[in-house]
């Protein structure tokens, strides 16, 4: 592994100045503020480590952060982009972006912090050996060590056991790597380049937090350390189980809405390494300032601040807090100084009722452009406070030197010049990834959930003899007629963005297809030429399109007719793939970024700037003409993919399923997890079976059957059970158990090459048991496992046919896997 670049442009900041979540910094109420003052006297930290978003124990994190008042954090090895999505069509990196923000939303509730490594969630893995081989053991281990060295925990907790019992590859790998990192973080010879900006760190102990969902009633847990995390916090008015449920319910894309728990809640821990815990995982750890030489006066000032705090007039605690701030700044560097300084500044500002924000005149800008920003500071208490100056990113310093009189805001308008090189792209998506890891070139971004806000204002404030800084991201705010005032982060985009209407174009024949492209100006320099860069033998009409956008924010849609190679033989499973890149030439510069936004109500609006590229696939597809009905499942892009190759698709909602004649449809397709997400599906069972009996084809894609989502409804005309069997190796050999079967022969004659180029997995939630009235056509398996035959069940019923498939068509079709299209076309045609 080559050492990562250590850029001086980004300081170590394990709690970066992020964009506003969905509103301005929240003023804590008196109870929360008292808790924040008490927290200043607690010096200790715990790091929780697991593999994915939603693996964390939110109840334990809530307890540690709010009852013990420790600095608690969750390190998720991946961002969860390999999972499924219950709330939208986003897959892959887009889903990872959603799940990143869901974790941040969860942490805002339970009070912990959030970190990541560069590892990619490449889908379910059955062994830790496979996981570590794909991730790259050394790189991910180095990332965990970096987080340990910079976060400096007293205790590390793993969610999963390193022996791999009752879990899978990613989970076990996360525990194995954490155990290794526990030792490596203290070794100065391990990745010494990190020591330019961090120091070796020896954590006191490593423990495993025994998960309880699969505990046996008679299991002997006497060898575990117990901790009751079910307490009630009177100041917050909630139990930690209630806080945890609200936090966990932020994982909405995974359907993890949780019910609050109240009362005793025991967690169990097993010692793995380090000083053994006997009564508590915090045994023997001094959590006071006594562990820091020279901090006695600081501790006294903090105790006095708590004593002087008054709920009705929090500013009474300010003199002691300001004395504590001065004392803290005089201490030598220590593992807690930076983080406690930020906590202390926040407490001072909250006790003074200080309001400080900076907001822009528009939500989008581009590098080199100018942006008007309003900065407002307001003192809502009687505390004597002075605004010294305001420092702006790219806009210099505005001197103020005025007292902040109570209830009299000071407003400053300034114009910023946006620095070159800035953009809103998530840092881990800026470069093409490798199979197992994201590409990140700056070491000090590693670990962060998102990059620090690129545009910010720093309010320099003085009170008494002390001067401190309130840093605020520059946001955009507006008034929604329904929701009221809303905030969002600033988007820094390219001067011109070029967004194609699709990321994949399928050419089932030699005819041309239209590609629509939206050109949008991010600045007032919007005149240029758009050119598609095509693979060899592909052509476009026209070859370029000039454009002129009068001002920032204007857009224009243009279209190219893309023609695949002519006269080149494409037969059977043969496919010709290539990539089309769109490049806009403006003012002597080239731009090739698209603009995409993700909007869900529970997370902030996300903006990303992917490469403006389209995958081109010319392949041979024979299909039966006809009208398809589609019952949408969770996060489903299959209908659009089918329309791309010429099928007419009608979405069947509840009303259509109740009243619309179904005989008009050649086939009806049920989307993934439809029976898990649509509670009305069992009511349509008879109508769908009548449709099949009358001559229709019904194709049901996978549904889950596990502890979180039970499958109790009948799906097919004959009994079968959905298991948790899957084949995770996307390259696993596929055997044609019935090579002469119509599904493998008509209208497309399939060969093993049709199963080349699949992405992430073969399939999941295969049938486990089934009636002998079903036929199985394919078998496949992961290495070392017996053949799995339940990926495709087929039966004739009346005049029609029923098919259940666990094959991952929901991934393959949007990804442009030609063989998956050919097999799906055969499923649609079966039974006629």
Image: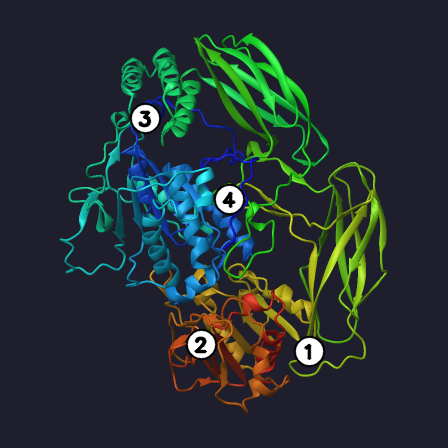
Q: Is 634 in front, or is 568?
A: 568
Measure how far apart labels 1 and 2 are at the Cα level: 25 Å
Measure how far apart labels 2 and 4 are at the Cα level: 53 Å
Q: In the rendered structure, which disc, 1 or 4, sits on the residue that comes first in sequence?
A: 4
111 versus 116 height, above or below: above
* Dot 2 crowding, Cα within 10 Å, few <14, some 14–19, many 20+: many
- Asked whether the residues under the numbered discs 1 and 4 touch, taking CB atoms below 8 Å apart as contact, a structural biologist would say no
Give the residue at x 64% y 69%: 642
- From the viewer's perspective, is the residue at label 4 or at label 3 nearer? 4
The residue that label 1 is drawn on is 625
- From the viewer's perspective, is the residue at label 3 or at label 1 nearer? 3
The residue that label 4 is drawn on is 443
The residue that label 3 is drawn on is 35
Q: Is 670 in front, or is 381?
A: 381
Measure how far apart labels 3 and 1 are at the Cα level: 67 Å
Image spot of residue 38 (x, y percent): 30, 24
Q: Quadrant of residue 613?
A: bottom right
Q: In the rendered structure, which disc, 1 or 2, sits on the residue that comes first in sequence?
A: 1
Give the residue at x 48% y 68%: 684
378 versus 205 height, above or below: above
Measure how far apart labels 2 and 3 are at the Cα level: 57 Å
Measure how far apart labels 1 and 4 are at the Cα level: 54 Å
The residue that label 2 is drawn on is 716
- Residue 240 in view, yes or no: yes
- From the viewer's perspective, is the residue at label 2 or at label 4 nearer? 4
Q: In the rendered structure, which disc, 3 or 1, sits on the residue that comes first in sequence?
A: 3
């Amino acid at each position: 592994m080559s050492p990562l670049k250590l850029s001086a442009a980004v300081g170590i900041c394990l709690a970066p100045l992020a964009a506003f979540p969905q509103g301005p910094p929240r003023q804590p109420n008196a109870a929360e503020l008292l808790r924040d003052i008490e927290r200043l006297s607690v010096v200790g930290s715990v790091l929780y480590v697991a593999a994915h978003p939603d693996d964390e124990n939110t109840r334990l994190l809530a307890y540690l952060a709010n009852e013990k008042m420790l600095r608690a954090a969750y390190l998720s090895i991946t961002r969860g982009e390999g999972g499924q999505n219950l709330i939208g069509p986003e897959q892959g990196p887009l889903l990872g972006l959603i799940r990143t923000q869901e974790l941040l939303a969860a942490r805002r509730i339970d009070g912990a912090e959030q970190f990541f490594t560069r590892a990619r969630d490449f889908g379910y893995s059955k062994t830790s050996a496979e996981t570590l081989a794909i991730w790259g053991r050394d790189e991910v281990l180095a990332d965990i060590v970096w987080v340990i060295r910079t976060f400096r925990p007293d205790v590390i907790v793993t969610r999963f056991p390193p022996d791999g019992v009752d879990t899978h590859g990613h989970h076990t790998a996360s525990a194995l790597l954490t155990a290794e990192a526990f030792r490596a973080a203290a070794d100065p010879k391990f990745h010494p380049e990190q020591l330019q900006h961090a120091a070796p760190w020896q954590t006191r102990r490593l423990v495993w937090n025994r998960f309880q969902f699969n505990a046996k009633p008679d299991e002997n847990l006497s060898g575990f350390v117990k901790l009751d995390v079910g307490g009630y916090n009177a100041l917050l008015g909630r139990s930690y189980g209630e806080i945890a449920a609200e936090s966990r319910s932020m994982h909405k894309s995974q359907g993890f809405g949780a019910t609050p728990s109240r009362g005793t809640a025991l967690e169990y821990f097993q010692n793995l390494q380090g000083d053994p815990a006997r009564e508590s995982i915090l045994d023997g750890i001094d959590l006071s300032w006594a562990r820091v030489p020279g901090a006695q006066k600081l501790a006294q000032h903090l105790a006095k601040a708590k004593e002087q705090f008054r709920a009705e007039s929090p500013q009474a605690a300010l003199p002691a807090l300001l004395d504590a701030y001065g004392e803290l700044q005089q201490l030598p560097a220590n593992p807690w100084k930076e983080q406690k300084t930020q906590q202390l500044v926040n407490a001072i500002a909250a006790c003074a009722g200080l309001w400080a924000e900076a907001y822009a005149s528009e939500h989008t800008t581009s590098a080199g452009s100018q942006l008007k920003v309003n900065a407002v500071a307001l003192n809502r208490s009687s505390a004597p406070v002075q605004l010294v100056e305001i420092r702006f990113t790219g806009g210099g310093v505005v001197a103020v030197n005025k007292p902040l009189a109570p209830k009299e805001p000071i407003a400053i308008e300034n114009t910023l010049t946006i620095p070159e090189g800035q953009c809103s792209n998530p840092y881990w998506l800026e470069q093409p990834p490798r199979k197992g890891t994201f590409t990140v070139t700056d070491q000090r971004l590693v670990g962060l959930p998102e990059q620090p806000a690129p545009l910010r204002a720093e309010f320099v404030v003085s009170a008494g003899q002390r001067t401190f800084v309130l840093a605020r991201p520059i946001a955009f705010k507006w008034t929604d007629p329904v929701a009221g005032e809303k905030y969002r982060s600033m988007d820094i985009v390219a001067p011109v963005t070029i967004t194609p209407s699709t990321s994949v174009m399928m050419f089932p024949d030699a005819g041309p297809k239209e590609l629509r492209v939206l050109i949008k100006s991010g600045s007032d320099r919007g005149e240029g030429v758009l050119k598609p860069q095509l693979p060899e033998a592909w052509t476009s009409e026209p070859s370029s399109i000039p454009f002129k956008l009068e001002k920032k924010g204007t857009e224009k849609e243009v279209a190219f007719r893309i023609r695949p190679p002519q006269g080149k033989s494409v037969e059977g499973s043969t496919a010709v793939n290539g990539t089309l890149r769109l490049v806009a030439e403006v003012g002597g510069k080239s731009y090739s970024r698209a603009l995409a936004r993700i909007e869900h109500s529970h997370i902030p609006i996300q903006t990303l700037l992917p490469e403006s590229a389209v995958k081109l696939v010319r392949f041979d597809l024979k299909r039966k003409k006809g009208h398809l009905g589609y019952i949408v499942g969770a996060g489903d892009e299959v209908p659009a993919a089918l329309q791309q190759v010429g099928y007419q698709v009608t979405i069947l909602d509840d009303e259509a399923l109740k009243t619309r004649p179904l005989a008009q449809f050649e086939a009806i397709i049920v989307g993934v997890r439809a029976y898990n997400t649509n509670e009305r599906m069992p009511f349509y069972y008879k109508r769908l079976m009548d449709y099949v009996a009358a001559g229709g084809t019904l194709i049901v894609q996978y549904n889950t059957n596990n502890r979180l989502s039970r499958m109790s409804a009948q799906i097919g005309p004959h009994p079968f059970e959905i298991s948790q069997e899957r084949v995770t190796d996307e390259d696993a050999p596929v055997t044609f158990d019935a090579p002469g079967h119509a599904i493998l022969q008509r209208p497309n004659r399939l060969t093993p090459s049709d199963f080349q180029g699949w992405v992430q997995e073969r399939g999941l939630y295969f049938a486990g048991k089934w009636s002998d009235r079903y036929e199985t056509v394919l078998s496949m398996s992961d290495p070392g496992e017996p053949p799995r035959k339940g990926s495709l069940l087929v039966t004739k019923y009346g005049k029609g046919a029923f098919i259940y498939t666990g094959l991952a068509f929901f991934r393959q079709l949007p990804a442009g896997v030609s063989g998956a299209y050919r097999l799906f076309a055969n499923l649609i045609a079966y039974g006629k």
